[in-house]
Image (spheres, rainbow, N blue to C red):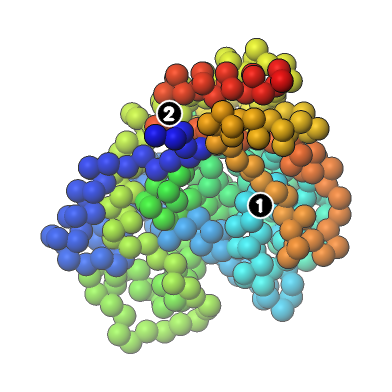
Amino acid sequence: MKMRLSKSIVGNAEAEAVSKVICEDGYLGMGATTREFEADLAMYLGVETWQVVSVNSGTAALQLAVQAAMVAAGKKASDLPEILVPSLTFVASFQAVSAMGCVPVPCDVLENTGTLDLEDAARRLTDKTIAVMHVDYASNPWKIDRVYDFAKSHGLRVIDDAAHAFGCRHHGHKIGSFGDLVCFSFDGIKNITCGEGGCLVAFDEASAAIAADSRLLGVRGDTAKRFSGARSWDPDVTLQGFRFHLSNIMAAIGRVQLGRLEGEFIPARRALYEQYRRHLEQMPAVRMLETDPADFIVPHIMPVRVPAARRDEIVTRLDAGGIPTGMHYKPNHLLTLFASGAPSLPHAEKLYDELVTLPLHPGLSANDVGLVCGQLQKAMDS
């Protein structure tokens, strides 16, 4: 079978959990299994169950976090509130901001990490700025405590786009166990998957309540009804809502995946990463991104830096050798929708020219990593 860049690692246990929802429970929408998944997530993260709001994608979690930030700031879309966002991220980060009528302000990143450059972000502050988004790029929560200090000093909310970082720890604390508005993705190739899904972890009750109602079309208190098997037949709606809730089917997959995380997925991903590191140390022209030794990284993707002048040639040679590659990501300020008036962001643009993502998922073996690195060495030597 051809090697995969990323892969969903699911099997009989997930299939049996879905079968139980279909054949025994009989209700496929948001209900008891979703409630149990939220409780499982809360227990894993060490937070209260009310803080966890499951949704149907990581993008939905980001959008609800933006909405909560707007409400907290007393802003409407007509005010054109701004949110600082690192440009080197998946377009979902920017789309979630613009979908709520806010303006995503592209910021540069640190060249050695790919994460938000706070000095550049500070230059882009205006009286319309309401929040700063930190993207845990390549599962790296780099100096996130400084982001919170920055936000506090400027009266901003922090939206942590932790789509890559489930299971990671910053200085001993799990990502999602602290913060303001933390957003996870559980799509098909993340550290755990629901097939499609995600969650918002909120650290104030008002934001959690806003998100819980908004995911169900803004119907007030409908979460409690759904979790008890009932519906709100005399509803009230006071804010914009969306159809963002997570179904029992997706939650059933997520519950099994969460149970596999610590014993199976985390050790596999970290072992593969270390094998890559040992091989790549022998290739001076190939550089890995910097991480904080005090952080516990559970790598979602494996981006490396190669000489920009040779990047496309190297990708072509790897492809010819049966090695798939990716590019995470094209900076958003270079996309047509978000390019209007965007400044040059030299570090994001430099990384865009240099980055190549190598295969990484728990379905790989140590021999696979050796094969990838062998082909990379051949490409570099050619």
Q: Residue 219 occupies which quadrant of the picture?
A: bottom left
Question: In this orientation, which residue lies closer to the viewer: 253 or 45?
Answer: 253
Mark 2 and mark 1 lie on one chain; the one further toward the N terminus is: 1
Q: Element under label 1? A: strand
Q: Is residue 329 left or right of residue 31?
A: right
Percent x, y for residue 80? Answer: 74, 72
Number of numbered markers: 2
Question: In this orientation, which residue lies closer to the viewer: 224 or 341?
Answer: 341
Mark 2: amino acid: Leu
Q: Is residue 74 left or right of residue 9?
A: right
Q: Nearer the viewer, mark 2 or mark 1?
A: 2
Mark 1: amino acid: Met
Q: Residues within 10 Å of mark 1 (few under 14, many from 20)?
A: many
Q: CA distance from mark 2 to mark 1?
A: 32 Å
User: Which quadrant holds the C terminus?
Assistant: top right
Q: Which residue ends up furthest to the left in the rendered image? A: 24
Q: Which residue ends up furthest to the front in the rendered image? A: 320
Q: Is residue 167 above or below residue 148?
A: above
Percent x, y for residue 349? Answer: 79, 44
Q: Which residue ends up furthest to the bottom in the rendered image? A: 234
Question: In this orientation, which residue lies closer to the viewer: 157 or 344?
Answer: 344
Q: Residue at x 64, y 42 (%)?
A: 327
Residue 152 showing in the rendered view? no
Q: Which residue is mark 2?
A: 364
Residue 160 showing in the rendered view? yes
Q: Is residue 226 above or below residue 43?
A: below
Percent x, y for residue 244? Answer: 44, 67
Q: Residues within 10 Å of mark 2 (few under 14, many from 20)?
A: some
Indicate which disc residue 133 carries: 1
